[in-house]
Amino acid sequence: MSEELTARVAALEQAVRALARRLDPEASAGGHTATSDPSDPSDPSDPSDPSDPSDPTVPDPGKNPFWALDGLKAQVGQTAGAVLYAGTVTVPTGEHYEWQYGHSVADLLDADWSGYAGTLTALAHPVRLLLLRTVLHGVRTTAELAEMDGVGTTGQLYHHLRQLVSAGWLRTAARGRYAVPPERVIPLLIVLSGAHR
């Protein structure tokens, strides 16, 4: 990655962290209000911005549905652009994940997309998607997964699990136990969001 791109990604990460601090639900639950420091260059808030919600802990799509996009555009400036995805997620098991990743448009367009085929192909089966969703809901052992309707024979189940592990969507946490790796939870949900119509 070039130094310029590294600097841009670092700036995006800093901006997202600053936004996350402003959107921290614990701060609003405790009665605290987020404040902005105009002398802090990492603070993306602008007190003169009319789209700034009165409660900065909760984004108000009615006032500015593009608050994340506006922050990204402010960071990348007049470049060809960037793609950033981020999320803060608590899954049904109570596990919490926060994650972000970004790429410049130039890097994405110059990449060999055929290298992504295996990772995407692993998701291209209804049983594998069912397995991933079920694991995120806390069913983690091969025995529990085998009891589900629609997964097929034990051999078919193991085939699907191997495909997901090979592509990095699942990890064997212990013998016969599976988990979605923490760094894959939000990307998985983003892929599903992109496929949602």
Image: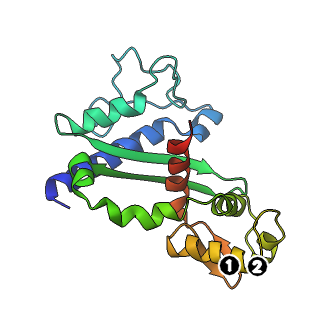
Q: Quadrant of the C terminus?
A: top right
- Classify residue 137 as left or right of residue 190: right
Would you place residue 144 above or below residue 108 in this image?
A: below
Would you place residue 107 above or below residue 45 in this image?
A: below
Instruction: Pinpoint residue 35: horizontal percent, then vertical percent.
Output: 43, 30
- Tell whether label 2 touches label 1 (CB within 8 Å): yes
Would you place residue 26 above or below residue 61 in this image?
A: below
Disc 2 residue crowd, few under 14, some 14–19, many 20+, Cα 10 Å: some
Residue 175, can we see it? Answer: yes
Q: Quadrant of the N terminus?
A: bottom left
Mark 2 — residue?
154
Secondary structure of the residue carrying tag 2 is: helix
Q: What residue is shown at x 72% (from left), y 60% (from top)?
A: 134
Secondary structure of the residue carrying tag 1 is: helix
Disc 1 residue crowd, few under 14, some 14–19, many 20+, Cα 10 Å: some
Residue 158 numbered tag = 1
Q: What residue is shown at x 51% (from left), y 36% (from top)?
A: 23
Residue 28 numbered tag = none
Residue 183, can we see it? Answer: no
Instruction: Pinpoint residue 78: horizontal percent, then vertical percent.
Output: 16, 34
Instruction: Pinpoint residue 148: horizontal percent, then vertical percent.
Output: 82, 65
Would you place residue 135 above or below residue 5 in this image?
A: below
Picture quadrant where residue 128 is located: bottom right
Picture quadrant where residue 68 is located: top left
Q: What residue is shown at x 55% (from left), y 60% (from top)?
A: 123
